[in-house]
Image (spheres, grey):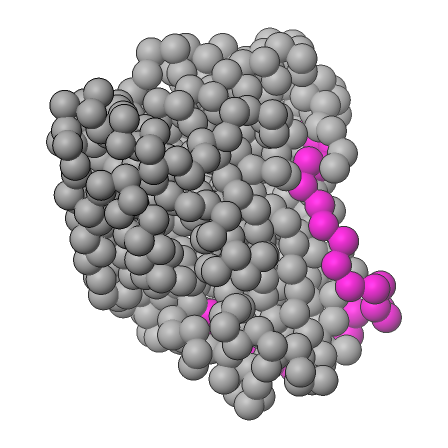
Amino acid sequence: MSQISRRGLLKSGIAAGVLSATGMPLMAAPKKGGRLRLGLAGANTSDSWDGRTHSDSFMIMCAHGAVFDCLTEVGADGQLKGELAESWEASADAKTWTFKLRQGVTFHSGKPFGADDVIASLNMHTAEGAKSAAKPIVSAISEMEKISDHEIKMTLAAGNADFPFLLSDYHILMYPAGEIDEAIASGNGTGLYMVESFDPGVRFVGKRFPNHYKDDAGYFDEVEVIAINDASARMNALMTGQVDAVNRVDFKTEALLKANPQIEIFEVTGNQHYTFPMQTGLDPFSDLKVRQALKHAVNRQEMVDKILLGHGKVANDHPIGPANQYFAADLAQNDYDPDKAKALLKEAGLDGLSVDLSAANAAFAGAIDAAQLYQNSAKAAGININVVQEPDDGYWSNVWLKKPWCACYWSGRATEDWMFSTAYETGVPWNDTGWENARFQELLLTARAELDSGKRREMYTEMQMLMSEQGGTVVPMYANYVDAHSTKLANSGTIGNVFQMDSSRMMERWWFA
C-alpha cells in the first residue's frame, strides 16, 4: 500500500494512491463493441438520477459509473485524476482551490459544460430542504467564484488537504445549470453512456455517447444493467449466460461459480465494512454501558467465518479500513466476552436486555443470517435480540435511519476524513447513530487541515479509538469486494477497490476480450 503525500497533492494536484489492487494478468489491447449485461443487487423502485439520493450499488454504477461525471476520479490504480476537472492548484493553507475544467465537453443534450454547471451542481447539495449525503463536503465551501467559463475558484471555510478527493464522491455529479430538474428526470449527464431507457428498480439501458472526451474508456456500444436483488437468482443469471457479470457473489454458491470454466471471480480488499448502527439518542442505546455491552456480545470471528466465509477480517467498531493510510491496526480489540457484557449491563443498572434488530439482505449479503448469529451469541450475555426481518425493497428509505437498530453496510472511503465527515460528523444527513463526542469533533476539524502526516496519524488513531470505545456503531467485520464475470470480459489487470465492481467503473474500464 503506497502512502499518499498531502503536500504532494497540494503542489501537483495529483495524489499518490492509497487504494490499489492488482487483479488479473495484463490483457491484450482493449477492443470496442458489444453489449455489456450486468446483473446487480442494490436496486430500489425509488431509484432516480438524483445523485444526492444514491446509496446503493445499482444507481452508483449507472450514474457515477456511466451516465454522469464528477470533477475528479479515483483511478483503478488508486491515483486521483481529473474527470471534468483537468487540473487543480491549492493555496499553502489548503483553503483556496482553483480548478481548470475540460473544454469541448457537452452534456448528452448538446449543451456545453462549463463553470456555471459546476456551481449549480454543487449548490444542489446545500439548497434548502435538500437531503444530500454530500452536504458536509459542499457546505465546507464558503465561496465559489467563476474566473472564466472553464476555470473556477473555491474557497473553503477551513483548510482541507483532501478536498480534490472529496469531489470524486459519487453523489457530486455534474448537471446542466438551469436544467437540473429536467436532467434528473431524463438522465442528462456528460458520461460515457447516454440513457436509452430507465425503469427504476428494474433496468437501465445505455448507449455509448459519440465523441466522448474519454477516448481511452467506454469500450462497449451498449450497456444493460438488470436489477437482480436476490442473490441466488443473480448467480444463476451469470451461470446460465443471461448476464456477463454480477456483484456481491453469494458465498453459499461460490463453489459452483468456481467450478464453471466460463466464470472468473475477482476479489479485492478495500474498506467495505458491515455494521449495526444504534440510534444513540434513543433508549437503551443512549447508555454508553449498554452500547459497550452489545459490542462485547457479538462473536466477530464467527461472522467472518460463516457470513463472509473468510472473505474479510474482524473489525473493531470504527469505519476506517485496512486499505486506509491511517488504519489503526494496534487498537485494543473489542472481543466477544459475554461475562464482560453482563458486567457492563449491571453497571447500567440492568439484569438483562431485550432489543429489536431490523435486518434485510438488502443491507448486505447474509445480513439476516448475521443478525441471527448476533442473536445467538448475545444470549450468553443475558441479551435477547429480536431479529425483525424487513423487506428488501425500500430498506434504505424505510428502515435505515428510521429504526433504532438495524443492519447496514458502508463501502468505506479513500481517505479518513471523507469517511468520518460523511457519516460521523455532527449533524450530517448520514450520521446513522447520531453519536456526538466533543473531542471526536475537535479532532475531525483539526486533522482535516493538518498537513503533517505524523500528526494526522495520531489524531486519526485517537478518533478510531473513541469510536471503538464509545461510538454507537457495532462494526463486526470488514468485507472484501467479491464479484464475478464471464471469461468473455477483459480489463487492464488492475482492479479498483474504492467500491465493488472495479470501483463501480466496470462499464468504463472493461471490454470484451
Q: Residue at x 45, y 31 (%)?
A: 334
Q: Quadrant of residue 20?
A: top right
**What range is drawn magenta here?**
13-40
Nearest the viewer among 109 and 276 is 276
> Furthest-bottom residue in view?
240
Q: Residue at x 59, y 13 (%)?
A: 458
Q: Residue at x 46, y 13 (%)?
A: 443
Q: Quadrant of residue 298?
A: top left
Q: Is residue 406 magenta?
A: no
Nearest the viewer among 168 and 379 is 379
Nearest the viewer among 359 and 88 is 359
Count up the numbered dots: 0
Is 248 on the left-hand or right-hand side of 362? right
Q: Is residue 36 magenta?
A: yes
Whether residue 177 is visible to the viewer of this picture, yes or no, is no
- Quarter of the image for the N terminus: give it: top right
Looking at the image, is 17 positioned above or below residue 390?
A: above
Nearest the viewer among 307 and 96 is 307
Looking at the image, is 5 positioned above or below residue 409?
A: above
The image shows residue 369 at horizontal and vertical percentages of: 35, 62
The image shows residue 203 at horizontal and vertical percentages of: 40, 75
The image shows residue 491 at horizontal and vertical percentages of: 74, 66
Is 210 on the left-hand or right-hand side of 272? right
Report the predominant secondary structure element of the magenta stretch. Answer: loop
Is 382 on the left-hand or right-hand side of 454? left
Q: Residue at x 45, y 53 (%)?
A: 303
Whether residue 231 is visible to the viewer of this picture, yes or no, is yes
The image shows residue 63 at horizontal and vertical percentages of: 46, 58
- Quarter of the image for the C terminus: give it: bottom right
